[in-house]
Amino acid sequence: MNKPLSPSFITSAADAESSAQLRRSVRGFTSQPVADALLLDCLQEARRAPSGANLQPGYFWQVAGARREQLSSRLQQAYAAGAQEAEDYGYFPNPLPLSLRKRQVAAAQALYGALGVERGDAAGRGAQFGRNFRFFDAPVALIISIDSGFGPGGYMDLGMAIYGLMLAAQSRGLATCAIGAMASYPGLIRDVLVLPATQTVVCGMALGYEDTGAAVNQTLTARAEIDAYFKRLD
Ligand SMILES: Cc1cc2nc3c(=O)[nH]c(=O)nc-3n(C[C@H](O)[C@H](O)[C@H](O)COP(=O)(O)O)c2cc1C
């Protein structure tokens, strides 16, 4: 098994105790292909995730070759044209409470700061956002869907498998980024992938070998302090 790549900002071995600590979203990849067997291995490990009644909801669709080109080209056109589709599911609270809005702004600052894109640079931000729809040029492009009958519990189960895939990839020297932006165009994606209307498009994922020289991969996000989400109630 390949050793996990160490991000440049983790300097001591004590900091890098587990895949979960090493994992971060990577948005710049080398062109090195990912062996099919390695991808399948990661997916099988990911599907060891627990799920309610072991229903194992969700599907991972690898989009490759001409179909990937068609998908990315249509997504980029739709994004450039400002096309809007009804989304299959709601993700964020609307309106976003201020405490969450602050986290969103901090994440955006981390990303655009790494790229040197100023806050007011709409074109620079748009260009980076558009890269979502090319799966950040990663060698592996995935669309992740779920049967539309599932409620939040099914999404929770699928989320564990998605994280499992991130960690399985991480531990094999690969890197990933989930792409929720895909959920803005569920009809377009179903059309290109020839999926039935009963498949809800949850997100995409880029997977491959990190381009350690890419500025975007210097993005480093923080987390809320523990007392913001954990309380002991006696
Ligand atoms: C379900 C999901 C969807 C995401 N969608 C996007 C996306 O569309 N584009 C993007 O650049 N990052 C996306 N991300 C990455 C988040 O921005 C990232 O996980 C967060 O800022 C924390 O940073 P880290 O993953 O590097 O720890 C997504 C993450 C998750 C879990």
Image: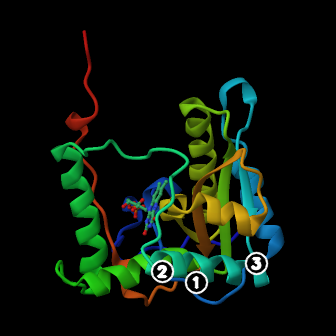
At a point 29% along the width and 80% down the height, the residue shown is: 114
Residue 90 vertical placement versus 81 (above, below) = above
Label ID, residue 137: 1
In the picture, the quarter occupied by the C terminus is top left
Q: Secondary structure at mark 1?
A: helix
Disc 2, disc 1: CB below 8 Å?
Answer: yes
Q: Residue at x 24, y 47 (%)?
A: 100
What distance separates the C-alpha of mark 1 from that of mark 3? 14 Å
Extreme residue toward the top, this view: 234
Amino acid bearing label 1? Asp
Secondary structure under tag 2 reads helix
Mark closer to the observer (2, 1):
2
Does the CB distance between marks 1 and 3 fall below 8 Å?
no
Separation of marks 3 and 2 at Cα, in angstroms? 17 Å
Q: Can residue 127 be seen in this snapshot?
A: yes
The answer to whether residue 18 of the structure is visible from this angle is no
* Label 3 sits on residue: 67
* Mark 1 CB within 8 Å of ligand 1: no
Task: Give the residue type that dot 3 points to.
Answer: Arg
Using a 10 Å C-alpha cutoff, classify the residue at mark 2 as few (fewer than 14 neighbours), some (14 to 19) or many (20 or more).
Answer: some
Identify whether 107 is placed above or below 200: below
Instruction: Depth check: give the residue in front, 123 or 49.
Output: 123
Residue 25: percent from left, percent from top = 45, 67
The residue carrying mark 2 is 131
